[in-house]
Amino acid sequence: MSREIQLETSSRILNTASKYMIVSVVAVAIGCVAMVYGILAYLAYGLVAMQFAIFAGFFVGVAFVLIGVFLAFWGLYWMRNEGKRLKRMFESRG
């Protein structure tokens, strides 16, 4: 019974970590699109005409990319730790 509970817990942790990875990819994609929008707004309209659009596009894009990278590393950290724990568990009972 204890082993089944450990495996269920591990599968939930790995499932959550994979969701972090998916969200991180989406956040990085949104960030890249926002940065490209900010750069194109700057090139097309100049700094004076669209200051808010440039700020919102570029700096919010950078923020999304940083958040996405953080979530990716967080998900990888949990996947790696849980993988090591499962490996030790199976080796000790194997």
Image (spheres, helix red, strand yellow):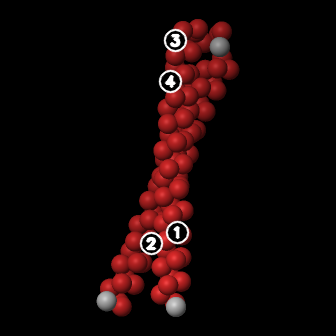
Give me the residue at 60% from left, 12% from top: 47
Instruction: Estimate the x, y position of residue 75 in percent, counting from the top left.
Output: 49, 59
- Label 2 vs 1, first from the N-terminus: 1
Answer few, some or many: residues within 10 Å of disc 1's Cα (few below 14, many 20 plus, some between 14 and 19).
some
The residue type indicated by label 3 comes to Leu
The residue type indicated by label 4 comes to Val
* Circle 3 residue: 43
* Circle 4 residue: 36
Looking at the rendered structure, which numbered label has been put on residue 13? 1
Tag 4, which secondary structure?
A: helix
Mark 1 near mark 4, Cβ–Cβ under 8 Å?
Answer: no
The residue type indicated by label 1 comes to Ile
Mark 2 near mark 1, Cβ–Cβ under 8 Å?
Answer: yes
- Label 4 vs 3, first from the N-terminus: 4
Q: Cα distance, mark 2 to mark 3? A: 47 Å
**Nearer to us: label 1 or label 4:** 1
- Label 3 vs 1, first from the N-terminus: 1
Q: Cα distance, mark 2 to mark 4? A: 37 Å
Give me the residue at 48% from left, 58% from top: 18
Indicate left or right for 88 with 36 as reference.
left
Instruction: Estimate the x, y position of residue 46 in percent, counting from the top left.
Output: 58, 9
Please indicate, yes or no, whether residue 66 appears anywhere in the rendered image.
no
Image position of 70 with respect to 1: above or below? above
Q: Cα distance, mark 3 to mark 1? A: 45 Å
Q: Cα distance, mark 4 to mark 3? A: 10 Å
Q: Cα distance, mark 2 to mark 1? A: 7 Å
Answer few, some or many: residues within 10 Å of disc 3's Cα (few below 14, many 20 plus, some between 14 and 19).
few
